[in-house]
Amino acid sequence: MARTNNVTELIIAGLFQDPEVQRACFVVFLPVYLATVVGNGLIVLTVRVSKSLRTPMYFFLSHLSLVEISYSSTVAPKFITDLLSEIKTISLEGCVAQIFFFHLLGVAEIFLLTVMAYDRYVAICKPLHYTAAVSRRRLLAASWLGGFLHSTVQIVITVQLPFCGPNVIDHYFCDLHPLFKLACTDTSVEGVVVLANSGLISVFSFLLLVSSYVVILLSLRNHSAEGRRKALSTCASHLTVVTLFFGPAIFLYMRPASTFTEDKLVAVFYTVVTPMLNPIIYTLRNAEMKVALKRLWGRKVNSGLQ
């Protein structure tokens, strides 16, 4: 697969070395992951069955929830089961596959969040053009295509590196910078490519998102008090999710590989914790979603009683 590979299996150092701490982490992170799957899955189901949620905003929200489930699932299941293992291993091929899907889904989420900001901009600033301007399936396809192209570049770089030992990856999952440290060659050029491919995508997308919301906030001065309240509620939820996702991503990927020290706790936050928080953020601040959830729950209760 690479030019010279004496290494076929990697040992994952993990989050902590103390067995007691690892078991405590298992007790904490297993419910968090299950809540991620259930919470995001409930959003997908609610949007699919509720006729009141057939707008582009909820279409994108349901797909964001699907991405969140998949994104967290690239890391969390193995990470959680490894907490109960004394020796944590993964094949080199499996490591590369994890990197590919992790970055594909991560960048797809970045572009999807950007698309959602565009959706809010058109809905609030250009309502008469909303239906025509927001082509849901094209924008969704563009998000996935962007993630695929980004991840392909990362993998093309990775598979050309020679790995001849050591084979201990200082992380709890496979990512580019920790894996680069194991290559028996200089990876400074590859580090710059990763900086450009990952870090700059995060920064530019974040700046675009912030700019769009500045325009939205300025345009709200011409809306009624009720319109401002509803728009601000929706935008606040989205901005909270954007900050929780982009903050750690920019922190980790905007540093050169030569001086990079992976902060595992920051990585845990955006790979395990943030995907669980998104359903809470979107449902607690969204009146339409709360009403739809209550109706869905009422249907389940009534069908169970019949």
Image: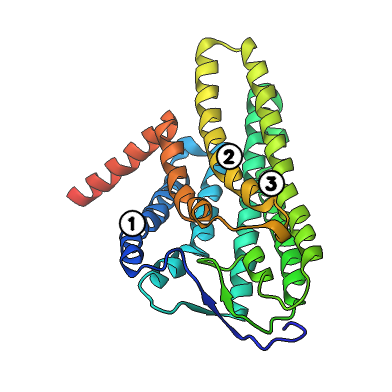
In front: 26, or 224? 26
Residue 99 shows up from this direction: yes
Verify CB contact (< 8 Å) between mark 1 and mark 3. Answer: no
Q: Is residue 224 left or right of residue 206?
A: left
Q: Which element carries disc 3, helix, strand or loop? A: helix
Q: Quadrant of residue 33?
A: bottom left
Q: Mark on residue 28?
A: 1
Toward the left, the furthest residue is 305
* Cα distance between the residues tagged 2 and 3: 11 Å
Give the amino acid at mark 3.
Answer: Ser
Q: Give the residue at x 56% y 10%.
A: 224
Sequence order check, earlier mark of 1 and 3: 1
What's the amino acid at mark 2? Val
Residue 120 percent coordinates (x, y): 62, 31
N-term-proximal mark, 2 vs 3: 3
Q: Looking at the rendered structure, which numbered label has been put on residue 202? A: 3
Q: Residues within 10 Å of mark 3 (few under 14, many from 20)?
A: many
- Residue 189 is situated, as x and y percent measured from the top left of the image, at 82, 64
Residue closer to the observer: 17 or 293 = 17
* Residue position marked by numbered label 2 in the rendering: 242
Q: Earlier in the sequence, mark 2 or mark 1?
A: 1
Q: Mark 1 and mark 3: span between their CA atoms?
A: 29 Å
130, 145: nearer the viewer: 145
Look at the picture and state if 65 lies above or below 74. above
C-alpha distance separating marks 2 and 1: 24 Å
Q: How many marks?
A: 3
Task: Specify the farthest residue to the right.
Answer: 189
Q: Is residue 39 above or below residue 176?
A: above
- Looking at the image, which residue is at 67% across and 56% down? 144
Labelled disc at residue 94: none
Q: Amino acid at mark 1?
A: Val
